[in-house]
Image (cartoon, rainbow, N blue to C red):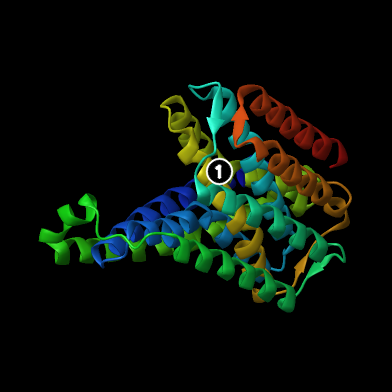
Amino acid sequence: MLTPILIFVASLALLLVAARFFTAAAERVGLVLGLSTFVVGVLIVAVGTSLPELVASLLAVRAGTSEIVAGNVLGANAANLLLVLGSVSALARSPNIDLGEQYIFIDLHFMLGGMVLLSAMMLDGTLDFIEGGLLLAAYAVFVVHLLRSGHSETLDAKAEVMLPDRSVSLIRDVAILVAAGVAIFVGGEFTVGALTDLAGALAISPAVASITILSLGTTLPELVVCVTAARRGQAELAVGGILGSCVFNTLAVAGASAVFGDVTVPTDLLGFAVPFVAVATLFFYLLTQDKRISRWEGMLLLVMYAFFLLTLARRA
């Protein structure tokens, strides 16, 4: 029991740290090459926050444990919506978080529509190549819409500071990208293997282990970052990033995994997790129609996440 736990913790830590370095280096490379800060945010930063989920899911399909994908996507979205956003709302400096930015409402609609689409596809217990392609197409529509609605910005001050040492910075960051990419692959490989061994030691299915242990582990860094931002009065920015991560998980992670190989959705997830996450997504969508999230609403989200975990623990 102790060995798979230690391997899982170490490999997950490697995966998360490498993803952070990869995202930061990719962001700097994008700015140096002249991409607008908006494009960098949409195509690099948003993807980088969900890179551990994507890598773990693709490697799980290759390892023949594709049921991890469904648990990973559902668990990550539940943790983002209920745990992270609930904590942000409950601990924010102001009593209400105002959702006034237009892109947040774009994310809300795509998040709800994507979850409805994914839930419907999961009902037969499998995500196949065609369904994965449709999910990826939906994500492409989301990205194109964001790019067309965003402003074409020039390099910001951060990029301009980097320009005098452009060649040196570029070589260094490309080297970081390569090293971090290798570390992400190794960390993901060991994470999936350790999670499978851990599930066997705990006598639970890999799907249940992924929807609880793995998804919670990959979400903890975002939880710390977002709560810190909320305490500093930057809760609105944290909400936008989390919603974008949910859209990526629902459409891109599930879609890419299904294109890579058929994804199995086990019955123990179909009976509770799929409908619960779908209802939670709808509930959050309706909750934010007044363009704000109150502290009490955040506490309610935390209670819902506790109920989610307790129910899964009883069913395991």
Q: Residue at x 75, y 32 (%)?
A: 304
User: What number of labels is visible?
Assistant: 1
Kind of residue indicated by mark 1: Val
Task: Classify 10 Å Cα crowding around label 1: few (below 14), some (14-19), many (20 and above).
Answer: some
Q: Vertically, is 279 above or below 310?
A: below
Q: Is residue 296 left or right of residue 116?
A: left
Could you tell me which secondary element the residue under label 1 belongs to?
helix
Where on the picture, by quarter, is residue 132?
bottom right
Residue 172 vs residue 78, the one in the foreground: 78
Residue 148 vs residue 254, the one in the foreground: 148
Where does residue 7 sit, x and y in percent of width and height?
A: 56, 47
Q: Can residue 235 be seen?
A: yes
Q: Is residue 268 left or right of residue 135?
A: right
Please identify the residue farthest to the left as the structure is shown: 164
Q: Quadrant of the C terminus?
A: top right
Q: Is residue 104 left or right of residue 309?
A: left
Q: Residue at x 67, y 63 (%)?
A: 254
Where does residue 174 sit, x and y in percent of width and height?
A: 29, 66
Where does residue 92 sit, x and y in percent of width and height?
A: 51, 25
What residue does disc 1 label?
9
Q: Is residue 113 left or right of residue 103?
A: right
Where does residue 216 sit, x and y in percent of width and height?
A: 63, 41
Q: Can residue 10 be seen?
A: no
Residue 51 vs residue 12, the one in the foreground: 51
Q: Vertically, is 294 above or below 84?
A: above
Q: Residue at x 24, y 53 (%)?
A: 156
Q: Quadrant of the N terminus?
A: top right
Residue 242 vs residue 174, the one in the foreground: 242
Where on the picture, by quarter, is residue 162?
bottom left
